[in-house]
Image (cartoon, grey):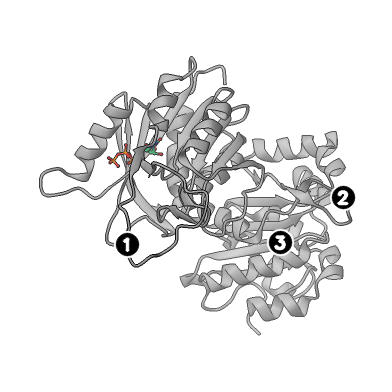
């Protein structure tokens, strides 16, 4: 077993303190821990006494390879109640109970975790999990607002099944989502300001499927990961988010996001017009099929000895252009473009031409081909603006790209938002 303060080889790895509060969701902290260690982080788990009633210290020690204690009087010679916070690159608390949030808001320090929260100068991410009544209680609302005003990131909880048979807001977000937020804050500590509070954003994601017969369709390789990252980051910046999703990889709906499922481009168009009518920002990140089979066969097309007929295609609507044409006063419309470039035209020039053609306010331009962007976890590109601004988006996670985009959107929103 290694030092009470940090693993000896920790300096080469990002050091994370994973605080675990005393709620039933403490068992999900094991999955958060596993994902963080597997992705190369040094993680020191600091549970509360309550958390240890749900999950034993041995589990956290085995998964982290580091000592686990809730008590500041263990290994006092190493001064862990000060050193853990001072040396951390990030503190994540998952689950953060109403009690823990209250203590953090008021600077109480009666165990190792609350001491650590007072000494940490790195980004702090609190991920709440509690019953809806507790989350909505004025005391908790006040404590959350106080913590956020100090720059602490208090994540939006998910909605769904709670401890018993009841459902509502207050569920711990999916462990994969917590890890994504943690990694985003490590890469960019200011990535989750509350800059979209009071803003309704409509985002499309994933690929459309254009049916040919009851069992076949024309589709594309979009995983939907970028659109989901946009939705996740917007919700964590305080926006009300409606995500209109076509076919995607196996992705969990981000916490705090309303999901609408669609299949074909025509269904996507109808859904986006409906949602956009009430949205302040509209983002088309979906990969829309430009064409659909002209006719839909009501039965499965059978193979015969004869050569098959070619598939006749009809043009799909250009949804982005339609949304631009229907734009409300002050509404921002954002498009995406994935370009390869060719012998005559660069990726950037194709992007500039597309921004003009589509008429949107912002265009996120990705270079694709050679395994770039599609189905990947990382992205890079440019953010082109109708006002002439061109920003390079450095290589980074799709959540980082989302943060860059939401910064540009927040800068352009009418001041009353
Ligand atoms: N888009 C759309 N409706 C379509 C096609 C695309 O709304 N029928 C949107 C996409 O969601 C994206 C943007 O338009 O925001 C650019 O998509 P892209 O496929 O690059 O544009 P196309 O107009 O199809 O241009 P290209 O000829 O380069 O494929």
Of tags 1 and 3, which is closer to the observer?
1
Residue at left offset 52%, top offset 49%: 298
- Secondary structure beneath dot 1 equals loop
Task: Residue 70 in the image: state x and y as whole percent.
Answer: 79, 68
Ligand 1 located in image quadrant: top left
CA distance separating discs 2 and 1: 44 Å
CA distance separating discs 1 and 3: 37 Å
CA distance separating discs 2 and 3: 26 Å
The answer to which of 29 and 187 lies nearer the viewer is 29
The crowding category of the residue bearing disc 3, from other C-alpha atoms within 10 Å (few below 14, some 14 to 19, many at least 20), is many
**Quadrant where the C terminus is found in the figure:** top right
- Secondary structure beneath dot 2 equals loop
Label 2 sits on residue? 166
Q: Which mark is residue 19?
A: 3
| Disc 3 within 8 angstroms of ligand 1 (CB) | no
Relative to 345, is 213 on the left or the right?
right
Residue at left offset 58%, top offset 51%: 123
Label 1 sits on residue? 371
The answer to which of 321 and 194 lies nearer the viewer is 321
Residue at left offset 64%, top offset 76%: 64
């Amino acid at each position: 077993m290694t030092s009470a303060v940090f693993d000896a080889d920790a300096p080469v790895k990002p050091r994370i303190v994973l605080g675990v509060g005393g709620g039933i969701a403490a068992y999900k902290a094991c999955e958060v821990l596993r994902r963080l260690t597997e992705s190369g982080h040094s993680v020191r788990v600091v549970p509360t006494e309550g958390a240890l009633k749900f999950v034993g210290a041995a589990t956290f020690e085995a998964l982290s390879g580091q000592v686990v204690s809730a008590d500041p009087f263990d290994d006092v010679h190493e001064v862990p109640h000060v050193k853990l916070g001072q040396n951390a690159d990030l503190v994540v608390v998952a689950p953060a109970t109403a009690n823990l949030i209250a203590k953090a808001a008021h600077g109480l320090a009666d165990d190792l975790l609350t001491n650590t929260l007072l000494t940490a100068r790195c980004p702090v991410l609190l991920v709440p999990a509690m019953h809806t009544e507790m989350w909505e209680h004025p005391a908790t609302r006040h404590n959350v607002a106080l913590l956020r005003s100090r720059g602490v990131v208090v994540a939006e909880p998910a909605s769904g099944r709670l401890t018993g048979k009841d459902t509502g807001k207050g569920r711990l977000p999916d462990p994969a989502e917590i890890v994504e937020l943690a990694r985003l804050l490590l890469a960019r500590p200011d990535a989750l300001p509350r800059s979209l509070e009071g803003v309704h954003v409509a985002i499309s994601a994933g690929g459309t499927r254009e049916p040919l017969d009851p069992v076949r369709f024309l589709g594309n390789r979009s995983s939907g990961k970028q659109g989901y990252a946009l939705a996740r980051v917007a919700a964590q910046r305080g926006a009300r988010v409606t995500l209109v999703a076509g076919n995607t990889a196996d992705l969990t709906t981000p916490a705090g996001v309303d999901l609408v499922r669609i299949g074909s481009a025509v269904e996507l168009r109808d859904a986006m017009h409906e949602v956009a009518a009430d949205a302040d920002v509209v983002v088309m990140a979906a990969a829309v099929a430009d064409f659909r089979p002209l006719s839909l066969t009501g039965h499965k097309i059978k193979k015969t000895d004869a050569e098959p007929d070619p598939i006749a295609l009809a043009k799909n609507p250009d949804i982005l252009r339609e949304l631009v044409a229907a734009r409300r006063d002050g509404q921002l419309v954002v498009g995406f473009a994935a370009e390869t470039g060719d012998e005559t035209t660069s990726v950037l020039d194709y992007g500039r031409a597309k921004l003009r053609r589509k008429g949107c306010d912002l265009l996120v331009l990705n270079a694709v081909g050679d395994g770039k962007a599609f189905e990947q976890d990382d992205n890079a590109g440019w953010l082109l603006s109708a006002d002439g601004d061109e920003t390079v988006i450095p290589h980074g996670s799709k959540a980082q790209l989302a943060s860059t985009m939401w910064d540009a959107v927040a800068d352009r929103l009418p001041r009353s938002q």
